[in-house]
């Protein structure tokens, strides 16, 4: 049996009528649901701009309200709401629709833009010339993420204050995946070059410095609180 509190929540989310005993509550609940519906579209549009543009205002608003009722926010900060949308779209629309790809890219971009600031530890780069790669770990900046789209792997990061993204070759993707998995440099190089002849570390390092992917080089595995994870 539902508690009165759960019944009220369900009513607010449009899953049922007003609980017994709330005299004249239907009109108030209808108004509150209208406000929540508008809020759901406004909140979801912040991280999912590409998806909103692809769907159009009306269809996106309908999606936002359906998603809100299925996965309501668990925190007061609505900017943290939306991580479950990718799987929600896979279940509802399927990968072939292209919508999960848009949601995946939008969410990774949103997370990158909200990631903590981190400056390049330039002196640590000297370790690349003095220490065997088996004893080195490359630390990527917060917000750097590797996502897998229907047409291939893609890297997402923040450059300045804006999120950026680019497609990766198989070798680049294998190398970045290894770094994000906290593999040492020697093993990461093996994974990047193993079955692929398209990965060159010098070229990657130049790009990593130019686009602010790299935070530093370490002679020990990353401390727990500094580890970079994929979303």
Image (tube, rainbow, N blue to C red):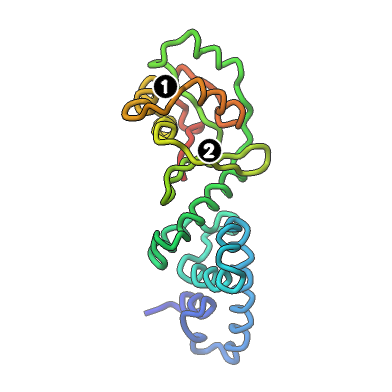
In the rendered image, residue 122, in percent from the top left (x then y), is placed at 61, 19
Occupied quadrant, residue 96: bottom left
- Of 156 and 46, nearer the camera is 156
Residue ranking furthest to the bottom: 24
Residue ranking furthest to the right: 161
Q: CA distance from mark 1 to mark 2?
A: 17 Å
Which residue is located at x 49 percent, y 68 percent? Answer: 67
In the rendered image, residue 182, in percent from the top left (x then y), is placed at 41, 29
How dense is the environment of label 1, judged by Cα within 10 Å: few (below 14), some, or many (20 and up)? many
In the rendered image, residue 25, in percent from the top left (x then y), is placed at 59, 87
In the rendered image, residue 219, in percent from the top left (x then y), is placed at 46, 17
Name the quarter where the N terminus is drawn: bottom left
Q: Give the labeled residue for mark 1.
A: 185
Element at label 1? helix
Above or below 80: residue 94 = below
Element at label 2? loop
Q: Give the labeled residue for mark 2.
A: 144
- Give the mark, 1 or 2, whose residue is nearer the N terminus: 2
Which residue is located at x 59 percent, y 55 percent? Answer: 47
Camera sees residue 77: no
Which residue is located at x 51 percent, y 13 percent? Answer: 127
Camera sees residue 195: yes
How dense is the environment of label 2, judged by Cα within 10 Å: few (below 14), some, or many (20 and up)? many
Which residue is located at x 35 percent, y 28 percent? Answer: 191
């Amino acid at each position: 049996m539902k508690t009165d509190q759960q019944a009220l929540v369900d009513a607010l989310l449009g899953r049922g009528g007003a609980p017994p005993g709330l005299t004249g509550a239907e009109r108030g609940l209808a108004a509150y649901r209208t406000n929540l519906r508008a809020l759901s579209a406004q909140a979801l549009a912040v991280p999912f701009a590409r998806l909103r543009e692809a769907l159009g205002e009306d269809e996106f608003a309908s999606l936002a309200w359906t998603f809100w009722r299925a996965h309501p926010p668990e925190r007061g900060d609505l900017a943290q709401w939306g991580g479950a949308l990718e799987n929600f779209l896979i279940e509802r629309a399927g990968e072939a629709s292209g919508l999960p790809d848009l949601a995946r890219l939008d969410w990774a971009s949103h997370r990158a833009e909200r990631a903590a600031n981190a400056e390049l530890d330039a002196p640590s780069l000297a370790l690349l010339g003095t220490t065997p790669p088996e004893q080195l770990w490359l630390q990527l900046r917060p917000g750097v993420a590797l996502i897998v789209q229907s047409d291939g792997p893609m890297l997402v990061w923040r450059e300045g204050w804006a999120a950026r993204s680019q497609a990766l070759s198989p070798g680049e993707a294998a190398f970045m995946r290894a770094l994000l998995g906290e593999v040492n440099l020697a093993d990461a190089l093996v994974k990047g070059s193993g079955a692929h002849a398209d990965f060159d570390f010098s070229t990657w390092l130049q790009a990593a410095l130019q686009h602010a992917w790299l935070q530093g080089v370490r002679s020990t595995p990353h401390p727990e609180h500094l580890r970079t994870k994929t979303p």
